[in-house]
Amino acid sequence: MQQVAEKKTNKIEAIKKALIEALQKNLGVVTASCKAVGVDRATFYRYVNSDPEFAAEVKAMDDYVLDFAESSLHKQIREGNTTATIFFLKTKGKKRGYIERQEITGKDGQALNEPQKTDYSKLSTKELEQLYGLLRKANSN
């Protein structure tokens, strides 16, 4: 009975090791890694939730994938890829002024916090009386 339990434990540990290797190969993509090893995602997440050491290895994979992506970005920059260079400067060069800014304004370029001014001189006497009536009604409530 103990041998059966040990075999099961060894098999699970072998699956976990294979999952970590597959995650590295698949750049952290769980579905592809599970498929490569032949286990379903539920099993993967059960291992993550029940084994802190396995969970830590999976979490460390995020840094591996990020390092890989950064290396790829740096390679593209060295090869003269303008888009990669701009992206890098926008994300890592902010303190040097490489940042995009948007200017948001109100109607006709007015500031958003400025109240819009209405020209009442263009209203007819009837329109002014209607407006005055609405204001009186609003103030009486």
Image: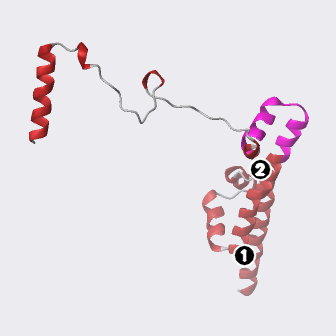
Q: Residues within 10 Å of mark 1 (few under 14, many from 20)?
A: few
**C-alpha distance separating marks 2 and 1:** 26 Å
Q: Residue furthest front?
A: 121
Q: Position of residue 81 (x, y in %)?
A: 84, 31
Residue depicted at 29% across the width and 19% down the height = 119
64 is higher (above) or lower (below) than 110 = below
Helix, strand or loop under label 2:
loop
| Magenta highlight on residue 34 | no
Helix, strand or loop under label 1:
helix
Magenta span: helix, strand or loop, mainly?
Answer: helix
| Magenta highlight on residue 77 | yes
Q: Position of residue 36 (x, y in %)?
A: 75, 52
Name the amino acid type tagged 1: Lys
Q: Residue furthest right?
A: 78
Dot 2 or dot 1, earlier in sequence: 1
Q: Position of residue 139 (x, y in %)?
A: 13, 39
Q: Position of residue 4 (x, y in %)?
A: 73, 80
Q: Which residues are magenta?
A: 71-91
Q: Residue furthest bottom?
A: 2
- Residue beneath disc 1: 8
Q: Nearer the viewer, residue 119 or 10?
A: 119
Which-is-in-front pick, marks 2 and 1? Answer: 2
Residue depicted at 62% across the width and 70% down the height = 49
Residue depicted at 67% across the width and 51% down the height = 31
Does residue 20 appear to the left or right of 132 in the view shown?
Answer: right
- Residue beneath disc 2: 26
Residue depicted at 44% across the width and 28% down the height = 106
Name the amino acid type tagged 2: Asn
Q: Nearer the viewer, residue 103 or 114?
A: 114
Disc number for residue 135: none
